[in-house]
Amino acid sequence: MTWHDVLVVVLLMAVAAGIIPVIAGVVQYLLVPVHAVKNHLGDAGPYLPRVVVVVPAWNEGAVLAASLERLMGLEYPPDRLRVYVVDDASTDDTPDVVLAKAAEHPGRIVHLRRAQGGQGKAHTLNHGIERALADDWMEALLIMDADVIYRPDSLRKMTRHLADPSVGAVTAFIREGSGKPGTVSKFIGYEYVTAQAAARRAQNVMGAMACLAGGAQLHARANLEAVGGRIDTTTLAEDTFTTFLTQLDGRHVVFEPAAVVLAEEPDSVVALWKQRVRWARGNVQITRRFKKVWFRRPFSSRGAGHRLSSLTFGAIWFSIYLLPVAMTAAALGLVGLYFVAPDIARTTFQSLWWVAVVAYVFITATTLMLDRDTTRRSWVQGLLFPGIGAIVVMLAAWIPGLWEVRIPQWLGVEMSPTAIEVLTLVFYAWTVIAMLSAWLVRWLETLPGGKWPSRFLLYFVGFGPVLCAITLDAYAKQWRGASTAWDKTEKTGRVVG
Amino acid sequence: MTTDDETRAPWAPAAMRREIRADQRSERRLIGIGLIAAVLTGVAIVVRAMIA
């Protein structure tokens, strides 16, 4: 074997790294239909524990009244539901809003105020949890966000799973519910169907849950006490931390797709970036903190009482965690092969993107059929989720010669060899080009009059690559040791339920 | 039949059991969704074979 052959093998392995996340995504989606027969509903039953809802609130005056009114209207026995609003030393009208609602619903809404605020959501939650655990009334505790709107049947659809004592916590389907969603909110709406309605069903099937949604975490009292009676304050992903602790302690975490909770999500790339860097940095912290969990024998971990160590769950977790690395490796591999072994590069490019086309069609078709409400709002964003650019590249791989020969022929023109070379290299490096262009999307948005060019570029680059770029940025910030101060996402009360 | 069963509240045990059964039936549509998605993927592969 010559050095040339060795280099070709190394480059091929780099490209193969890019296929792993795509295959992991397809595997996850293949598990979704299995949820039809393998779900927790068979072990659910009529169970209505006394629930304390903890609502962390820092300057949430604009959204709290609607959220509290919806909580009071839940189809749940009124004498079994109490709401603790933990006011994190708000400087707006949050206390007035809460006190007015408490007067309307005496004994059912309680205003708890922290004298010193600004420490972050976990600290705020702990204030309410400590109070709830202080008396025996509470049998289950629901953690939610101040802006989310619970559908009337959602809470009892969650509590029914706690009828099974092996279940420690239950989460719901958070659906983007802005009244007039913009482009970014619509992309997030579609993303939430993939990341929750699809992925968490698959995780139900696997028996390992990645994360209880921050806005909808229902804990059995026993579980809350077993994980220490408080939420971790040392990471930026306190919800994921609790999810892992619950499962490591031998209790199941269940996702209930029929419990729908509406949330307002960011409608600008800048706000999205801020929110997701926090989430992604939290995941970096979680991955390190639970390093002894990953890929441990026995992979099924029945004896250990959890399945976080399974090969499938680990592969899916790291496919998302290392997505920027995989995308970069694939592009470097293809571009390297282009210069070292052009024929192999062509075949490899077609194979890589052939798999991507299959994954795109299967995943997009499934997602669009999963949640009709979201599809009505976000079908365009669903189809263009990977970006127009990626679809152009997929077509290039699917139909060889389409852009270089066939279309120019139809137009009666001919592409120069140099133009073909440049186009080929752009196709090969697209995963990295799209990821780096995400910074341009964000920068354009900050310019006067830059919103619409930014949106156009977002459609071209794709929402997926933007999320990938944010993860890359999170790595960099985590590596630099940037501040981990909790950075709140502004909410305006756009949710319509 | 308990007193709760006789109430019309949506959280009455009988109503909740019906709701669970309905949601179980609703989840069965996932099999159809998976099949349709698989067929669409198959169609894409066949079209590609015909064009290329």
Image: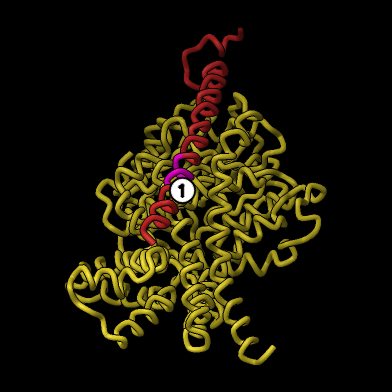
Chain colours: A yellow, B red
Chain of the residue that carries numbered disc 1 in the rendered image:
B
Q: Nearer the viewer, residue A169 or A483?
A: A169
> Where does residue A65 sit, x and y in percent of width and height?
34, 42
Q: A317 or A141, which is in the foreground?
A: A317
Decide if residue A133 is in sight here: no
> Residue at (55%, 28%) from the top-left corner?
B24
Which residue occupies 39% across, 55% down? Answer: B50
What residue do we see at 72% from left, 38% from top? A166
**Foreground: A125 or A271?**
A271
Q: Is residue A479 visible?
A: yes
Q: In this view, does A387 lie above or below A49?
A: below
Determine whether A178 is above or below A464 in the image. above
The front one of A383 and A403 is A403
Q: Where is residue A197 in the image (x, y as percent from the top left)?
A: 48, 45
- Assess whether residue A94 is covered by the magenta stretch: no
Three-letter amino acid code of the residue under disc 1: Gly
Mark 1: secondary structure: helix
The residue at 62%/81% (across/down) is A9
> What residue is shown with label 1?
B42
Residue B37 appears left or right of A408: right
Res A182 quadrant in image: bottom left
Expressed as whole percent of the image width and height from the top left, the position of residue A45 reads 62, 25
Q: Give the range drawn in magenta.
A: B36-40
Which percent across, then down, holds residue A209? 62, 50
- The part of the image, by quadrant, that contains residue A256 is top right
